[in-house]
Image (tube, grey):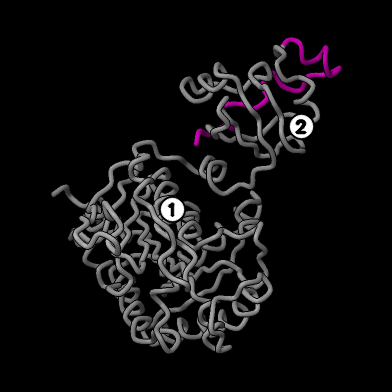
């Protein structure tokens, strides 16, 4: 078997930074929050802290906990109903975590995030700064992060906390991300349909074949299916962060994985590690528009690492100002890159297809030769 990509975490005396995500279906039992499992999770966090690892916990479960307390028979169907359930459940859930961690000598901190918080560059930096202070505290503090379901609307939602956990791992530059789920890994076929299906122990790269293995949500409690977990793995591994998908019923397996034992499915860190600002460009920033490119511009941006010039732009969609984040599309409409534009949508409509030397003649001025400079571009 291939050596665990996590095993390197045990080779250093310095503590590592680990993000653990736990899903709603793992946290909720038939009679409300599973207190025994939350206690075992607390034991794991305490052991990690004792080993000088720093931990961030990304948790789902606010809506599920609120649904239990309000005695709702089914998942809330409307956004206001979901927000109300989350408003009830979040306080209960946080109280459980705070009590469990305090009993083990740990301090907890709560952060509630929406897509807008990480999509805005300044708020992204603010969240990063807050987390860095918490993670540097002594004695240890465990930041506990959830999506702010009580105020988020559909357009601002991450859609699932698998994505949120990968964005958080990127935000804090984690050494590893563990997703504790109601499934114990990625299988070559749906094990509910094909009981003999083999679990993949290691995924070196997220190919179309790997993506094709992803299915839908398996529970009426959670919102994330295998597709969201593979999407989270794409984000994490692109940032150089290995992701382990494992059973949430055995949180102790996080410790086993750190000791180099095979657990669940490990998605290996990608060879080209995105750094700092380009992580935000690729995964967190909110896209304000789209630019459709010709084939030559796609090659220049993707294969040659060049800036995007107005000559390569064929179509402009959306309304945006200079500095906005836009998606770049190939002739077939597939996103190939993202970047921060030097010109507004109105200006780009006028100069698209023109050479850089012609910009001043068209607009009456020229601020830049490039529509997007290569330093502000990242391929996706």
Mark 2 highlights which residue? 345
The residue lying toward the viewer, choosing from 146 and 109, is 146
The residue lying toward the viewer, choosing from 331 and 203, is 331
Q: Is residue 229 above or below residue 58?
A: above
Residue 72 percent location from the top left of the image: 56, 85
Q: How many marks?
A: 2
**Label 1: few (<14), some (14–19) or many (≥20) C-alpha neighbours in 10 Å:** many
Element on which disc 1 rests? helix
Q: Is residue 315 above or below residue 139?
A: above
Q: Which residues are magenta?
A: 357-380
Q: Quadrant of residue 259?
A: bottom left
Mark 1 highlights which residue? 232
Q: Is any atom of residue 375 visible in this view?
A: no
> Residue farthest to the front?
193
| Residue 360 sits inside the magenta stretch | yes
Residue 316 percent location from the top left of the image: 71, 29
């Amino acid at each position: 078997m291939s050596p665990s990509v996590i095993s390197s975490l045990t080779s250093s005396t310095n503590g590592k930074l680990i993000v653990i995500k736990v899903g709603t279906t793992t946290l909720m039992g038939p009679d409300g929050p599973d207190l025994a499992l939350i206690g075992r999770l607390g034991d794991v966090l305490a052991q990690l802290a004792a080993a000088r690892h720093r931990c961030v916990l990304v948790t789902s479960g606010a809506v599920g906990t609120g649904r239990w307390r309000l005695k709702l028979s089914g998942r809330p169907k409307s956004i206001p109903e979901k927000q109300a359930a989350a408003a009830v459940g979040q306080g209960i859930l946080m109280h459980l975590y705070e009590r469990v961690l305090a009993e083990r000598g740990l301090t907890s901190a709560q952060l509630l995030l929406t897509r807008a918080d990480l999509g805005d560059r300044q708020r992204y930096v603010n969240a990063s700064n807050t987390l860095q202070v918490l993670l540097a505290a002594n004695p240890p503090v465990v930041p506990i992060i959830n999506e702010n379901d009580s105020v988020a609307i559909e357009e601002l939602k991450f859609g699932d906390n698998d994505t949120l956990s990968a964005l958080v791992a990127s935000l804090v530059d984690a050494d590893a991300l563990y997703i504790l789920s109601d499934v114990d890994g990625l299988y070559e076929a749906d094990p509910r349909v094909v009981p003999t299906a083999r679990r993949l122990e290691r995924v070196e790269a997220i190919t179309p074949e790997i993506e094709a293995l992803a299915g839908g949500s398996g529970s009426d409690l959670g919102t994330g299916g295998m597709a969201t977990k593979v999407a989270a793995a794409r984000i994490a591994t692109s940032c150089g962060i290995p992701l382990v998908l494992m059973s949430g019923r055995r949180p102790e397996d996080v410790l086993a994985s750190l000791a180099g034992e095979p657990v669940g499915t490990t998605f290996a860190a990608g060879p080209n590690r995105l750094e700092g600002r380009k992580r935000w460009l690729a995964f967190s920033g909110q896209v304000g528009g789209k630019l459709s490119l010709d084939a030559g511009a796609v090659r220049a941006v993707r294969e040659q690492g060049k800036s995007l010039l107005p000559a390569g732009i064929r179509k402009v969609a959306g309304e945006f100002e200079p500095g906005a984040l836009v998606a770049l599309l190939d002739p077939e409409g597939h996103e190939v890159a993202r970047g921060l534009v030097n010109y507004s949508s109105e200006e780009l409509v006028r100069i698209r297809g023109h050479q850089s030397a012609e910009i001043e003649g068209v607009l009456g001025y020229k601020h830049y030769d490039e529509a997007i400079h290569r330093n502000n571009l990242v391929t996706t």
